[in-house]
């Protein structure tokens, strides 16, 4: 399994662990999942805003961004470490 698939699986596991809570609080929002910390890094309305915030607040962390809900169609994997 390559690095991208490993990060994807870790992010999915974190999301599934918190799914009920996050879908109640953030349905339809974009979240950034911090794979290194096993938690949510930030929440916002669009990928660009979430990306800017997470780069500033969690430099060097592996981040997976997705839309909260059943259809995460705009999910974007950030598979590089931010510096």
Image (cartoon, helix red, strand yellow):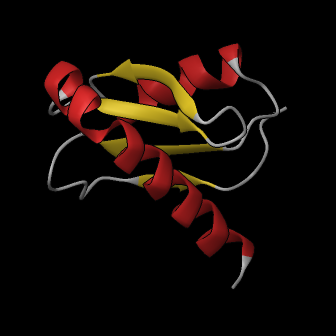
Place of residue 39 in the rendered image (x, y in percent of width and height, measured from the top left) = 55, 30
Q: Is residue 45 above or below residue 19?
A: above
- In the rendered view, would you say 70 is above or below 1? above
Q: Is residue 35 above or below residue 29?
A: below
- Image quadrant where residue 57 sits: top right
Q: Quadrant of the N terminus?
A: bottom right
Identify the residue shown where x is 39% and y is 32%: 31
Image quadrant in which you'd find residue 8:
bottom right
- The number of numbered badges drawn on the structure is 0
* Residue positioned 36% across, 36% down in the render: 18
Relative horizontal placement of residue 50, taking residue 55 as reference (left or right): left
The quadrant of the picture occupied by the C terminus is: top right
Expressed as whole percent of the image width and height from the top left, the position of residue 33 reads 51, 37
Q: Is residue 52 left or right of residue 6?
A: left
Q: Nearer the viewer, residue 70 or 52?
A: 70
Residue depicted at x 52% and y 52%: 11
Give the side of residue 49 with respect to residue 61, left or right.
Answer: left
The residue under the point 26% across, 27% down is 21
Counting from the top left corner in percent of width and height, residue 46 is at 31, 29
């Amino acid at each position: 399994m390559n690095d991208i698939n490993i990060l994807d699986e870790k992010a999915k596991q974190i999301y599934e662990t918190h799914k009920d809570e996050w879908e109640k609080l953030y349905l339809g929002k974009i979240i950034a999942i911090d794979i290194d910390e096993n938690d949510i890094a930030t929440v916002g309305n669009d990928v660009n805003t979430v990306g800017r915030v997470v780069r500033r607040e969690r430099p060097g962390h592996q981040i997976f961004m997705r839309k909260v809900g059943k259809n995460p169609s705009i999910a974007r994997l950030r598979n590089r470490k931010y510096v």
